[in-house]
Amino acid sequence: MQHAICYISTATSEFNNQEIENLLAEWREKNSNREIKGILLFSEGHFFQVLEGEKVKVLALYYRIIDDPRHTNVIQVMGKDVSRGSLDDYVVEHLKAPGFSRPYLIRKYCESVKGMDPQTQQQIREILDSFIDTRSL
């Protein structure tokens, strides 16, 4: 059974650019090796993540994230079984560029979840919208 979870959280400490880039690369590799697909964004001390894959693996990872001392205020905003996987890969990004394009980012990440049912796509879009809107410009 495939399962998808979307959550947001706050980092418990400040990471410099190199530290966060290293962590994102490490998590991308680990999750790809576990056959977990998704989206992980980090911006101004906050994480936004969609995880998708075999239910047992996704739930195990999510519970490890909850217990990870680098995360606090972990809020699951969506969790559901999905009939089929829809994500092609595991995408990570540190949203740090001062001139980022909000419409481009929304389109880019919503494209990643197009295979999900329309209700789930809409939920993720709304959460992503809020996550990107909270960035200081």
Image (spheres, helix red, strand yellow):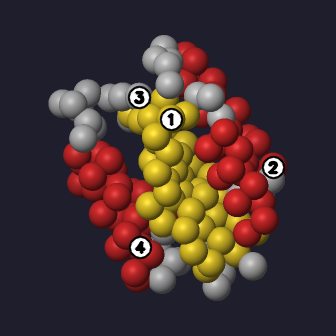
Residue at image location 80% in from the left, 53% down from the top: 34
Residue that badge 2 annotates: 33
Name which residue type carries label 1. Answer: Thr
Of the residues tagged 3 and 2, which is closer to the observer? 3
Observer-side mark, 4 or 1, equals 1
Number of other residues with Cα within 10 Å of mark 3, as a class: few under 14, some 14 to 19, many 20 or more: some
Choose between 37 and 14: the one closer to the eye.
14
Badge 3 element: loop
Which residue is label 3 attached to?
45
- Given the image, on which type of amino acid does mark 3 rest? Gly
Where residue 29 appears, as percent x and y from the top left, is 74, 41
* Distance in Å between CA atoms under marks 3 and 4: 25 Å
- Circle 1 crowding by C-alpha within 10 Å: few under 14, some 14–19, many from 20: some
Q: Give the mark toward the camera: 1 or 2.
A: 1
Sequence order check, earlier mark of 2 and 4: 2
Q: Amino acid at mark 4?
A: Gln
Callouts 2 and 4 close, C-beta under 8 Å: no
Q: Secondary structure beneath disc 1?
A: strand
Identify the amino acid type marked 2: Asn
Q: Position of residue 76 (x, y in %)?
A: 49, 57
Q: In which quadrant is the N terminus drawn?
A: bottom right
Label 4: which secondary element? helix
Disc 2 to disc 4, C-alpha distance:
25 Å
